Image (cartoon, rainbow, N blue to C red):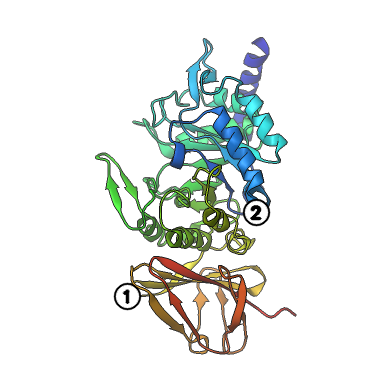
Amino acid sequence: MRRLLLSLASLLVASVVFGQKFEQLARTPPMGWNSWNHFGCNINEQIVREVAQAMVRSGMRDAGYEYVIIDDCWQGERDSLGFIQPDPERFPSGMKALADYIHSLGLKFGIYSDAGDRTCAGRPGSRGHEYQDALTYARWGVDYLKYDWCHTENLNPIGAYTTMRDALYAAGRPVVFSICEWGTNEPWKWGRTIGHLWRTTGDITNCWDCIIDHGTWKSWGILQILDKQDGLRIYAGPGHWNDPDMLEVGNGMRVSEDRAHFSMWAMLAAPLIAGNDIRHMSEATREILTNREVIAVDQDTLGIQGFPYRREAGVEIWFRPLAGGDWAMAILNRTETPRTVTFNFREEYIFDDFSKRGTFFDRITYRLRDLWAHRDIGTTETPLTVEVPGHDVVMLRLIAPKP
């Protein structure tokens, strides 16, 4: 115990000089799984172990998913010196043993805390214990921290998140720091030097187009979350991402809605954090979550978020510039009715003011790759005509000729 207290004292001294976030992490949007959307508080170490196994077995790990993140309700009480302990009934083997197991599978371990004195579910938060918790997480082998914003009365968010950032850095173990402040205080304007990603909205829910009012807060459907991203793309890039919340793929929506949801998150360069029970997912859900061609768009190294180019009668056409001169294109049908869409590339010129990239369809012929059908469908020399089913998407990669 004396050694632990000496370590904590060293952290406090080191943070005065060296506080910063860990650079060179999350150079592409983080990918993984989080327990909250499906399990809520009904989580334990056996479920987490089984999920980690399923990430390997299903091909998710090989497709790029690496973080296994336990959300709220893992906490027990603090000991007599204030160090957090896991719930002994839910996690009897302890967090280090669980982290070691996850690491043995080639995965990384993530955990949850809160900037307030209590978490959203009423468990002990980190307020006043930031350096103790950071030291504890480092000893356990934590690689990712989701840091929530419940019960934070009278706290300044920049100060609160900076304190935990500095504590993590002083603890010495590189950790991806996820700011879960819900967008209330515009974290995209100040989060770049503090965290690696920041929530832009309140909580997502598993519906296509709805708002669920809980009284003091609301949950938002896929389209509502998507619309709230307008104007935010200029703040995102390698190492600092807008986070429109975790995926609801496999949690009860239609397959077409899941496909569109996944596609648009890829167009947004969003973190891809699955939130379903991947131990028992359908083959359709697995195919969506492991579509490597769509994942490649999300993980594109250029790191430029996509944008809506045209919106008309419930149909949206989005573009996203990619590394190597390629572009991603998504045609989203927000309506229930199938829509036939024609796009004459030769008559269009897409220019992105932010990245200063243009398509130059009059001089460059791109090959068209359908990312859900996994086949080439022509080039930009001729107009594209596709039927987009209701609540669905057509997603293409426009592949530039290589020198």
Residue 268, above or below 361: above
Question: Would you name the residue on which mark 2 appears?
Answer: 63
Q: Which of 227 and 249 is in front in this view?
A: 249
Q: Nearer the viewer, residue 223 or 50?
A: 50
Within 10 Å of disc 1 (Cα), the crowding (few <14, some 14-19, many 20+) is few
Q: Is mark 2 on a helix, strand or loop?
A: helix
Residue 49, above or below 326: above
* Extreme residue toward the right, this view: 403
Query: Alpha-carbon distance for marks 2 and 1?
Result: 35 Å
For this view, does 334 lie left or right of residue 379? left
Residue 256, above or below 17: below
Q: Which residue: 50% across, 62% down?
A: 263
Q: Which residue: 56% across, 53% down?
A: 286
* Extreme residue toward the left, this view: 215
Q: Which of 143 and 90 is in front in this view?
A: 90
For this view, does 177 lie left or right of residue 390? right
Question: Count of labels shown?
Answer: 2
Residue 313 has which mark? 1
Please, what is the three-letter code of the amino acid marked with disc 2?
A: Ala
Please, what is the three-letter code of the amino acid marked with disc 1?
A: Ala
N-term-proximal mark, 2 vs 1:
2
x%, y% of residue 294?
58, 63
x%, y% of residue 130?
52, 26
Q: Which residue: 65% across, 52% down?
A: 64
